[in-house]
Image (cartoon, grey):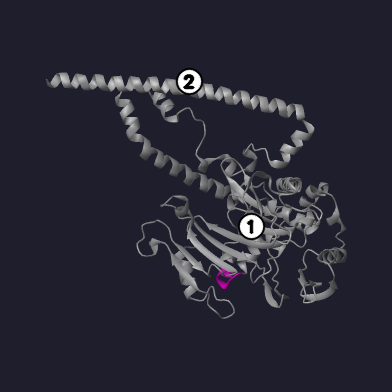
């Protein structure tokens, strides 16, 4: 059933009609009955199994995009097309053609109902905080299994949802989970940023695809950004503009709207330029932009071709998770030509290395600009190199956020996620108590060390002031 497309539509009589591949199957009095009807058709009784089956389901296939391994993955994907009618409106299912490895997923949003994790009658509101906590813990555990990270903190509601939770570390946001709200029809939204998908453990695409297939076959992918990187500038925004003028982005004989963004279109000072195909309200939006300039390196030739898909006029298949390159290749005529030539998107390790190089150059450049006058002054006042380094560090051990290891690998974050704290409290009450005592002791010790460092800095500043006064008096005495 994973290759079939299904939709449940509420009709004028208040009943729920089940469509499979655009064909009417049966009408049900409740949406849950329609869901069970589809599951019975596919023999997906495993979708009702407990959460213990999640990891097993998530590990059935090798990863099929450049963010994971390539073992066992075909290089050619067949072309398919389909149009279904939902609420009287025709929706197109995107084509798939060409190499699976021509793209990676840069941003992803999907929704599913709370029935996947808890009973559909469980209330989620301020009167039942224990239910909100339970669902958040289950979501954190599930995301940790699929991606390697879970929920780190709660925030205010977003996008009409009453509750929202951040997935991430102390320095990086990986994504957002939201649920609750009277107008959201018991749905749960999961939004993953580009940083989150980069930091996710390799093979997350296949794990998520299998989890959706087994546990949430009715989940909807509402946004999916597909990207291909040209590190050596093999395809540029200028070439994309020319392709648009020559009909390379035409769709069914119509030319989509386009626009130029960035000062470099008029004066090429390497601050970056972007070429857009489509409007912000379009179901498909293409961005071809100078990724290196965006990251802060004006000399970089790195260009990114990015296709943003939304489910406004499309049904985005779950298959896009493991065939990202095929869907990017089939998006426009120019894509078929371009990604037949560049069939393999640069691997995750290459993107990470390129980003780290740019970030390091950026940090060193601005650190030099801001600190060099101060360093020159302290050297003139006679401070040693070690004293200068200690003064400038100010007793802090943190590193620039741009270069944090957890931006590239979530396993480096050392975070305790929501579901892990519950497990600790249940299984290791005494250990938690000792852990909290140790934290308190470290905090007290840190305050003491900070106080001593401050006194030491004050003493050094006093020495600097005395040295300056002495040099000034000496110069004054020579004059008079």
Residue at 25% from the left image edge and 19% from the top image edge: 470
The image quadrant of residue 373 is top left
Q: Are marks 1 and 2 in contact (CB under 8 Å)?
A: no
Q: Position of residue 262 (x, y in %)?
A: 42, 62
Circle 2 Cα neighbour tier, 10 Å, few/some/many (<14 / 14–19 / ≥20): few
Q: Magenta includes 356?
A: no
Image quadrant in which the N terminus is located: bottom right
Circle 1 Cα neighbour tier, 10 Å, few/some/many (<14 / 14–19 / ≥20): many
Residue 19 is left or right of residue 198, and the answer is right
Q: Which residue is mark 2?
A: 452
Under circle 1, the secondary element is strand
Indicate which label's residue lies in the foreground, 1 or 2: 2
Q: Is residue 323 above or below residue 394?
A: below
Residue at 44% from the left image edge and 54% from the top image edge: 293
The image quadrant of residue 119 is bottom right
Question: Which residue is at the front of the view, 371 or 152?
Answer: 152
Residue 282 is left or right of residue 385, and the answer is right
Q: Which residue occupies the extreme bottom position in the image? A: 253
Residue at 50% from the left image edge and 55% from the top image edge: 231
Magenta stretch prevailing secondary structure: helix
Answer yes or no: is residue 149 visible: no
Q: Position of residue 154 (x, y in %)?
A: 64, 46
Q: Which residue is mark 1?
A: 108
Q: Is residue 463 above or below residue 422?
A: above
The magenta segment is 331-337
As measured in the structure, the alpha-carbon distance from the residue carrying label 1 to the one carrying label 2 is: 48 Å
The image quadrant of residue 458 is top left
Image quadrant in which the C terminus is located: top left
């Amino acid at each position: 059933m994973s290759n079939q497309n299904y939709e449940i539509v509420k009709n004028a009589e208040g009943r729920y009609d089940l469509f499979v591949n655009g064909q009417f199957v049966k009408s049900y009095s409740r949406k849950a009955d329609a869901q069970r009807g589809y599951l019975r058709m596919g023999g997906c009784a495993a979708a009702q199994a407990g959460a213990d089956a999640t990891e097993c389901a998530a590990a059935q296939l090798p990863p099929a995009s450049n963010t994971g391994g390539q073992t066992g993955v075909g290089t050619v994907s067949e072309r398919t097309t389909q149009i279904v009618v939902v609420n009287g409106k025709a929706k197109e299912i995107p084509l798939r053609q060409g190499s699976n490895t021509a793209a990676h997923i840069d941003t992803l949003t999907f929704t599913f109902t709370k029935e996947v994790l808890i009973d559909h009658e469980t209330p989620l509101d301020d009167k039942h905080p224990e239910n909100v906590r339970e669902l958040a813990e289950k979501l954190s555990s599930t995301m940790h299994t699929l991606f390697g990270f879970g929920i780190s903190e709660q925030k205010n509601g977003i996008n009409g949802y009453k509750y929202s939770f951040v997935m991430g570390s102390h320095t990086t946001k990986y994504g957002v989970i939201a649920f609750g709200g009277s107008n959201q029809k018991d749905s749960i939204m999961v939004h993953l940023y580009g940083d989150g998908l980069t930091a996710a453990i390799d093979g997350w695409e296949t794990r998520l695809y299998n989890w959706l297939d087994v546990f949430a076959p009715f989940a909807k992918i509402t946004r999916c950004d597909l990207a291909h990187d040209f590190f050596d500038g093999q395809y540029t925004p200028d070439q994309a503009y020319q392709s648009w003028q020559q009909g390379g982005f035409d769709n069914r004989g119509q030319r989509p709207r386009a626009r130029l963004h960035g000062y470099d279109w008029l004066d090429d000072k390497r601050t970056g330029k972007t070429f857009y195909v489509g409007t912000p309200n379009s179901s498909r939006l293409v961005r071809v932009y100078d990724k290196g300039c965006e990251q802060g390196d004006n000399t970089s030739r790195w260009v990114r071709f990015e296709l943003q898909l939304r489910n406004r006029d499309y049904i985005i298949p779950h298959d896009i998770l493991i065939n990202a390159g095929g869907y990017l290749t089939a998006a426009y005529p120019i894509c078929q030509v371009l990604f037949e030539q560049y069939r393999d998107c640069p691997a995750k390790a290459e993107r990470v290395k390129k980003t780290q190089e740019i970030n390091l150059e950026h940090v060193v450049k601005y650190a030099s600009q801001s600190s060099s006058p101060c360093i020159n002054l302290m050297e003139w006042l006679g401070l040693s190199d070690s004293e200068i380094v200690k003064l400038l560090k100010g007793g802090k051990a943190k590193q620039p956020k741009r270069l944090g290891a957890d931006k590239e690998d979530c396993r480096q974050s050392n975070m305790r996620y929501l579901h892990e704290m519950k497990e600790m409290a249940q299984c290791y009450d005494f250990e938690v108590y000792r852990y909290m005592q140790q934290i308190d002791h470290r905090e007290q010790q840190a305050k003491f060390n900070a106080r001593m460092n401050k006194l030491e800095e004050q003493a050094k500043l006093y020495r600097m002031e005395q040295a300056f006064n002495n040099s000034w008096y000496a110069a004054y005495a020579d004059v008079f």
